[in-house]
Amino acid sequence: MRSYGLDTKKPFRFPPKSDKIKRYVRKGIPQALRGAAWFWYAGGPSRVAKEPDLYRNLLERVDKGELSDNDREHIERDLNRTFPDNIRFKSDPTTTSDIQAGAGGGGGKKRKSVPEPETPIVRALRRVLQTFAVHNPGIGYCQSLNFIAGLLLIFLDEDEEKAFVLLEIVTSVHLPGTHGVTLEGANIDIAVLMSCVKDSLPAIWEKLDDKGGIPAGDPSASALRLPTVSLATTAWFMSLFVGTLPIESVLRVWDCLFFEGSKTLFRIALAIFKAGERQILAVSDPMEIFQVVQTIPRAMLDVNGLMEELIERRREERRRDVRLGVAGTDAGVLMGRWKGRWRSRTRV
Amino acid sequence: MAARSQQGRPGARFAQFKLVLLGESAVGKSSLVLRFVKDQFDDYRESTIGAAFLTQTIALDEQTTVKFEIWDTAGQERYKSLAPMYYRNANCAVVVYDITQASSLDKAKSWVKELQRQANENIIIALAGNKADLVAEQPDKRAVQTADAQAYARESNLLFFETSAKTAENVKELFTEIAKKLPIEQASQRGMRGAAGRPGGVDLGNRQEAGGAAGGPGGCNC
Ligand SMILES: Nc1nc2c(ncn2[C@@H]2O[C@H](COP(=O)(O)OP(=O)(O)OP(=O)(O)O)[C@@H](O)[C@H]2O)c(=O)[nH]1
Ligand SMILES: [Mg+2]
């Protein structure tokens, strides 16, 4: 980055996307630049430019009482359950029962008289989640958004507005519908992932395919039932791997996500299955397979290996796509009715 | 249905059962499981996204071992459409509410109703009023009277405990009482038969039938 003559302390602009920059990003964005680079490459500045007053207006709308009681309650419940072990989120446990009593209102002015055990980042998290819920009635508050917003705040120096904007981008560009009130999009993500496994890891698929899980689409077409193990992957997409991979690996995944888009998520998910291949093939009970798949990513510290795996996988995909043409794959047929979403989730 | 078993030393019985935890978010489902499986407690527990799967084995007596395969589900309303996937093969369920939150009992009741309508006919259901430690310290925090919950449990034919994942009060008892009610003998026999044909395997045919019987996953219109 220095070669571009940019200020590495508080960079506002980053070099334009190129293969060279992509290679840098894949090796991991330096910690100090991370949040700013995410914001820049995900298209944050242009979003802000389009609606510069959005966040402020939303804060006002929350203050005016536009947040539903249900969303407010669920957000309050999760504030202390977001990175509870992180020092910046940890409030004093002896006084936390007062939080509930004082909860509400956007600004926090009404809580002056109550002892204030909350850390600033927890207050910022509350406002980001509240404004997001008001702005997205089709989503409201969905558990898992707390983890995404929380990690964004950490790396954006607690800049709430930027965290809000990135949360908007994640839920509208990268994972449309995934967090919606019916979680319909989450089921699509899983179906797409499973068809990717079927296509590119057929030996593993053979083992996974117990038809025990979610029906992919038409409930009458039981042949399309997804395997039990697919239920383990719901959280991968919803939380963008927070709580699934070790945090160091999550950051590396997010580096690529914000630079390259949602295909990153599918590649990482495939890489997890690939990494667990030997273990998966060694067990036979679907519940044992489930445990293997649930456990593997927790120890995946070797992000370099994971990333290399990814890149190799992508080359294979490219070759295969060239050979077959995407529409000719099984997955393409299976996902026919969700064509638009399928494309938006797998565009290479 | 999904119960399995195998025989070790002569006279010993081993059976495996599927258990699902249901209930409003933050009532303490994951905390109860963590106490039961690892004998630990966290003051702040991260909310569950989707579901987690854990196992724990308990000895009922010298001859009898029961292994629980536990689905710990997410409590938020929007996950409800996924719930049938977890309970449709369940042999037993723990429906949890928070004794300091009256509304969480209403949610628990609606889960009980759904289970009684949609899950296995013979499912054993336990009702757990969690966070008992909070009212031990401050009695005025109680929002659900023990007698009321007990009466409801009796008329709905549920096991009932007030529990604390924090102090471990009644946690072991809850799971032990469930185990005692499960058809261990039957499961052992079925398991022996099953094991003869397909060692260690699960009868996927059954699994699917059960799915059909439960009407598939509720509200998935995708
Ligand atoms: N005092 C007290 N607190 C508890 C008890 N059980 C759970 N908690 C706390 O209540 C909060 C929620 O507990 P969880 O176990 O995460 O609740 P859950 O039902 O799994 O919630 P979801 O995963 O969101 O559905 C956590 O902060 C726990 O520490 C208990 O017995 N006593
Ligand atoms: Mg939980």
Image: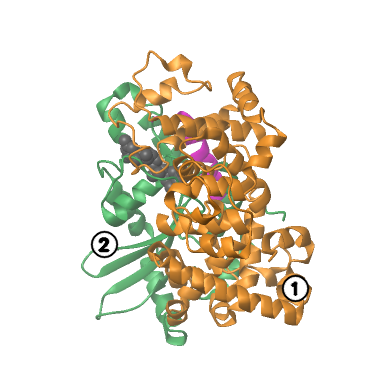
Which disc, if any, is residue B60? 2
- In the image, B118: left or right of A221? left
Q: Residue lying at the far top in this picture: please name it.
A: A113
Residue in front for this viewpoint, B121 or A258:
A258
Displayed quadrant of residue A323 = bottom right
Q: Give the position of the C terminus of chain B as an image quadrant.
A: bottom right
Residue in front for this viewpoint, A145 or B168:
A145
Q: Residue lying at the far left in this picture: please name it.
A: B62
The 10 Å Cα crowd at callout 1, few under 14, some 14 to 19, many 20 or more, is some
Which chain comes out green in the rendered image? B
Displayed quadrant of residue B7 = bottom left
Residue in front for this viewpoint, B170 or A244:
A244
Check if mark 2 and mark 1 are on a common chain. Answer: no
Q: Is B105 inside the magenta-drawn segment? A: yes
Q: Residue B95: in sight, yes or no?
A: no
- Residue B71 position, x and y percent, is 45, 57
Residue A164 vertical placement versus A325 (above, below): above
Residue A65 vertical placement versus A187 (above, below): above
Secondary structure under tag 2 reads loop
Q: Colour of chain A?
A: orange
Which disc, if any, is residue A185? none
Amino acid type, callout 2: Leu
Name the residue carrying label 1. A326
Q: Which residues are magenta?
A: B100-115
- Residue A120 position, x and y percent, is 41, 29
- In the image, A48: left or right of B102? right
Structural distance between the alpha carbons of marks 2 and 1: 56 Å
Mark 2 vs mark 1: give the one in front. Answer: 1
Magenta segment main secondary structure? helix
Identity of the residue drawn at 43% across and 86% down: B196
